[in-house]
Image (cartoon, coloured by chain):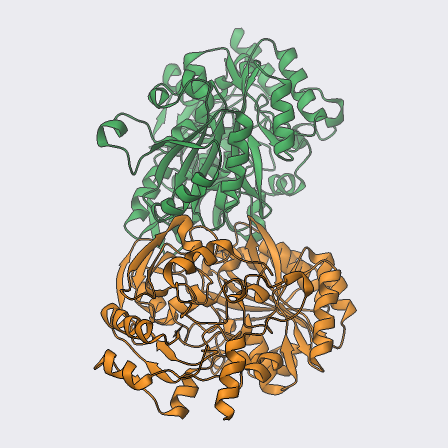
Chain colours: A green, B orange
């Protein structure tokens, strides 16, 4: 793919649709939180689009896609840019399709909300509150993340302790997707078809409308429980997560000394050396939660937002902004050498063995989530980064010890996921983006059908390299 | 305990509180669905109170308890009388404390409802509907069962697939309980203390107020799915139950030919030989449910109330009235030789092995429920009754094959439960009912502290026998 896109012709074709070509602003909109990873930081530093286009309607999206298709300019859809793997970074330039102005919330009914793709997740939760409802799950970037960005680039988050992940049946209800063709079509995806576009990074269609399930909204209590050991915190978190009658939205474990070193506004309440469990508990479950915790030896409730004095609460960020990828962010802000991994542990024993193995080099961070009807351990451990080789070794050791790694230091769907082709998504791309113009470089199966995953070598997208070379000349 | 209660003096003491002494009406109010069990039917046939008292306030309850305590007359609290084990039957006569007129729903807030003990569960669900809420769980006798009766005599029901059982932390929020003393006191139980009175059959206090958690209310779709084998139906039910994103309120499996033979209004829609899975699915989960079911070989959706024509729905009882103890009831109505067991199976393999073992003598009936964070199999298999000895043999064989039996052919807490003393409940009885006047004969630990459970002999309450003898003279 060459870098010589006819941007002038493209602008002519799209007419009055709002766009931006100032290189500084374009580059700003061409990034996400890829810099959490020192590997991606090196690889993607130079990535930028040629133009940012900000449609306000489905008709404008169609006009953009039609024009780009005609001129063979790649198009990378983007929401709030809160991803961590370069999901929405235009590896080989072209059009950055900024969907943040398509943010209308269209209908709210019992159990359902329909919105445009760029609606902020926080805004959806505000709008649905009047009906006593909220989204089942949200990323820790709730305030700035868009709903379609979450569906296309996320996997789960706060709420997954009850509902599982976005890929599970029922956690996305309907997507409207526009194809990248001479005459863009819109397709409605429901049921099994949703798997075609959920977590596909916008490589096989542009999401123009999202229907999500809602659940009962509560004024969740934010709670921090302290433990002398990470193992103790883990055991408590699992036992609490398995209490079916205690309604919760978040169960996170963070090993010492992360809370003390990185949670700057909360650190005063956390004794030295303690690992913590961070929780969101329904108010009407607090009595039961406290009774359960009292029975659990070694658990000390350090903070409960529903009992704390207003002074004690003021200035604190929401507790979910200490969890999921925000944990890493808080580490990075204090210690720029911090990075992370994404892990699925088979059980609490493996959590312990692996964390004992990497003591000092890694700080434990678990997110408990439901997985096929059972509570499972996801992990986003904080890693003290030394070299890329060592990081790779650590990944291999995790795998050798029985854990699954979703590598956050790779920009492709396959390497960040199950290390194999998603045949459903690939087939859908053939149908929706026959020229391969949507978010190029992210789906290995499309770019290099013969890529050998078992060789354990990184995929390098030629378009990224060509673009970088062109930029230097 | 003698049968010579001074009922006349008691009436004098309670003054204008409404009561009934007509023996036919008193006997009517002295029973429950104990006759599901041929054993209890024989043992409890003659049981009747001497007087039914129907207080309308806590002050009246206190007056009744005070008078009965003074005269040493036993008092058995009763709600709707929908239990199956004689929970509310006055084994040795005395006062039947009918709480059905204390039925006010006091407050409804987000996540909580407070009511008097005799409020009907169906009425609570109607009252909370305006706020978009409903109870987490209800028995199949929702229409006629009271909330305190459910808490004191039940263990779970429709909704337990999501929330677990009534004994789990968080599924009852608060109970107000009155003691049986010279000066009755009221105690407020929350958190861990709730275990003192939940499922204690009213042996250690009279519940005068109940606070229960609420959850989001939906217009649940009623669905029937057909399978060629019981094993296939079981596997599908488990897989569906483990779908965290598909919100459901009920997952029941009923083996052939129960649906065809006993579900008289539904039988026309169920092909001969098919076992069925009976479901309540949230409307916004139907798409996902149908997509999931399509992937499951051998599953045929036979009925979906949200797609069925009004003619097809008219005259049908609610689907939950085919499940839990209503399954047994429907069997009994057609074939009076039907009775049942209550089983917890360790896994699907045990379900299959046990049901293969008893083919023809037993018809499989499973209720899937959450249990310590995982989906578990509870069973209420229909048994073609021959003799009490054979029933006992079947129970022993179940236990030998790894299943746990909660014997529904026993009237004591211990024999119907874990076959051991509940020390918490016993200690609470010492505190709340020092004379042992509340619902005598139901707590073995109280009646006979030296009873040897390991001997596997039935407990026979002497008071029941004395009463029966007295009635003959």
Q: Is residue B200 depicted above or below A114 in this figure?
A: below
Q: Is residue B329 depicted above or below B423 in this figure?
A: below
Q: Hey, which residue is sitting farthest right in the picture?
A: B357
B374 and B429: which one is in front?
B429
Task: State the image quarter where residue A406 is shown.
Answer: top right
Residue A180 visible (yes or no) = no
Q: Position of residue A78 (x, y in %)?
A: 44, 31
Q: Residue at (36%, 51%) from the top-left corner?
A: B190
B29 sits to left or right of A202: left
The quadrant of the rendering that contains the N terminus of chain A is top right
B373 and B52: which one is in front?
B52
Q: Position of residue B318 (x, y in %)?
A: 48, 74
Q: Residue at (45%, 74%) from the top-left corner?
A: B88
A82 sits to left or right of B404: left
Q: Is residue A191 depicted above or below A291 in this figure?
A: below
A166 and A356: which one is in front?
A356
B240 sits to left or right of B309: right
Residue B249 visible (yes or no) = yes
Q: Position of residue A185 (x, y in %)?
A: 50, 46
């Amino acid at each position: 793919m060459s870098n010589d896109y006819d941007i002038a012709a493209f602008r002519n074709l799209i007419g009055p649709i709002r766009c931006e070509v100032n290189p500084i602003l374009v580059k700003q909109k061409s990034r996400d939180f890829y810099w959490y990873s020192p590997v991606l930081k090196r690889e993607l530093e130079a990535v930028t689009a040629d133009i940012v286009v900000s449609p306000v309607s489905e008709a404008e999206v169609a006009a953009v896609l039609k024009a780009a298709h005609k001129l063979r300019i790649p198009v990378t859809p983007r929401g709030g840019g809160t991803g961590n793997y370069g999901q929405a970074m235009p590896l080989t330039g072209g059009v950055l399709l900024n969907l943040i102005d398509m943010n209308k919330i269209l209908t709210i009914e019992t159990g359902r909300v329909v919105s445009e793709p760029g609606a902020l997740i926080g805004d959806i939760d505000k709008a649905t509150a009047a009906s006593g409802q909220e989204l089942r799950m949200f990323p820790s970037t709730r305030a700035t993340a868009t709903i379609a960005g979450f569906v296309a680039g996320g996997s789960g988050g706060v709420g997954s302790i009850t509902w599982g992940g976005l890929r599970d049946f029922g956690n996305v209800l309907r997507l409207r997707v526009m194809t990248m063709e001479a005459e863009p079509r819109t397709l409605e995806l429901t049921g099994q078809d949703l798997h075609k576009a959920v977590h596909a990074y916008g490589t096989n269609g542009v999401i123009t409308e999202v229907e999500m399930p809602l659940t009962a909204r509560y004024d969740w209590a934010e709670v921090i429980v302290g433990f002398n050991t990470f193992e103790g915190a883990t055991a408590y978190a699992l036992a609490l997560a398995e209490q079916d009658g205690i309604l919760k939205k978040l169960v996170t474990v963070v090993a010492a000394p992360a809370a003390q070193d990185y949670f700057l506004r909360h650190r005063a309440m956390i004794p030295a050396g303690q690992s913590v469990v961070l929780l969101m508990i329904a108010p009407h479950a607090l009595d039961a939660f406290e009774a359960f915790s009292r029975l659990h030896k070694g658990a000390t409730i350090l903070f409960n937002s529903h009992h704390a004095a207003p002074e004690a609460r003021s200035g604190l960020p929401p507790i979910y902004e200490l969890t999921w990828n925000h944990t890493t962010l808080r580490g990075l802000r204090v210690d720029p050498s911090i990075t992370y991994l994404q892990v699925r542990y088979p059980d609490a024993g493996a959590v312990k063995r692996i964390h004992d193995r990497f003591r000092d080099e890694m700080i434990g961070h678990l997110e408990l989530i439901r997985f096929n009807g059972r509570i499972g351990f996801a992990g986003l451990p904080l890693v003290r980064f030394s070299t890329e080789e060592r990081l790779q070794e650590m990944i291999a050791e995790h795998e050798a010890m029985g854990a699954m790694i979703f590598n956050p230091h790779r920009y492709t769907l396959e390497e960040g996921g199950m290390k194999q082709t998603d045949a459903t998504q690939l087939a859908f791309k053939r149908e929706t983006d026959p020229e391969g113009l949507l978010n190029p470089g992210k789906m290995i199966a499309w770019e290099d059908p013969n890529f050998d995953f078992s060789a354990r070598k990184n995929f390098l997208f030629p378009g990224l390299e060509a673009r970088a070379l062109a930029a230097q000349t």
